Image: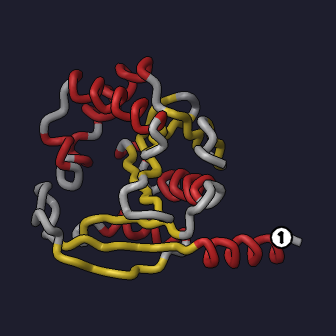
Amino acid sequence: MEEPAESISSDQVELRRWRMSDLDALERAIHESLDHLVPWMPWAADPGRQQTLDFLARNKEEWEARQAFGYAITSDAAVIGSCGLMRRIGAGGLEIGYWLHPQWTKRGLATMAAGALVRQGFQLAGIDRIEIHHGAANPASGAVARRLGFTEVERMQAPEGPVAPGEVGIDVIWRMTADQWKARTSERAQRAS
């Protein structure tokens, strides 16, 4: 498979490829989530309609170039966050990123969304590892990686230092290999039978 599915269902969330018509819903979700996003996401410090429009346009371009695959996280058709698979960690690898509107946190929805991305990612040709990167001061992002069975492989000084107010300048890198994924999938199938 050259690119993941444009729409993915996973338990209580639906992921669907971002589209330009999502501008108002995404802008609303961002503005309602600013207190939650600003500590961790540098782009959230200066949100604006043009920035959101640029994000959607960039998502379209990156999808078509097969460099990144951005999704709206939805529940009951409402946009509740964003996630994506990005080819920015070298050949054979994908990085997952995600955020949720604070009213939708602590329900396992980020884990469901990221798990759906892992399944899609390992179906892409040539992918041998998937990573989740987050700031060390953001344990909630690490909890998603841990619940999915990722292994923490490195803590490193962020080259640019802290870029958002909640960061301490240490990046945590979690990794899952294709072999780990196959073993986990096989184990789950055996338990189910």
Nearer to the camera, 160 or 8: 160
Image spot of residue 41 (x, y percent): 23, 50
Please state the horizontal and vertical placement of residue 158, each as a whole percent of the image: 17, 69
Residue 40, relative to residue 46: is it above or below?
A: below
Residue at 39%, 46% in the rendered image? 100
Q: What colour scheme does the image use?
A: secondary structure
Residue in the image at 66% along x and 48% along y: 1
Q: For the residue labelled by badge 1, is the local secondary structure a helix, a strand or a loop?
A: helix
Task: Find residue 68 and report its horizontal and vertical position in percent.
Answer: 43, 45
Q: Residue furthest right?
A: 193
Please give the residue where the numbered disc 1 appears in the rendered image: 192
**Residue 132: in sight, yes or no?**
yes
Between 23 and 33, the one nearer to me in the picture? 23
Residue beneath the point at 56% across and 69% down: 128
Query: Taking 1 as reference, is 188 above or below it?
Result: below
Which amino acid, mark 1?
Ala
Question: Looking at the rendering, which quadrant does residue 153 occupy?
Answer: bottom left
User: Residue 20: percent from the left, percent from the top?
Assistant: 41, 21
| Horizontal side, residue 159 vs residue 27: left or right | left
Q: Assess disc 1: are there few (<14), some (14-19) or many (≥20) residues with their C-alpha within 10 Å of its C-alpha.
A: few
Residue name at image x 61 percent, y 71 percent = 178
Q: Is residue 126 above or below residue 55?
A: below
- Is residue 72 shown to the viewer in this render? no
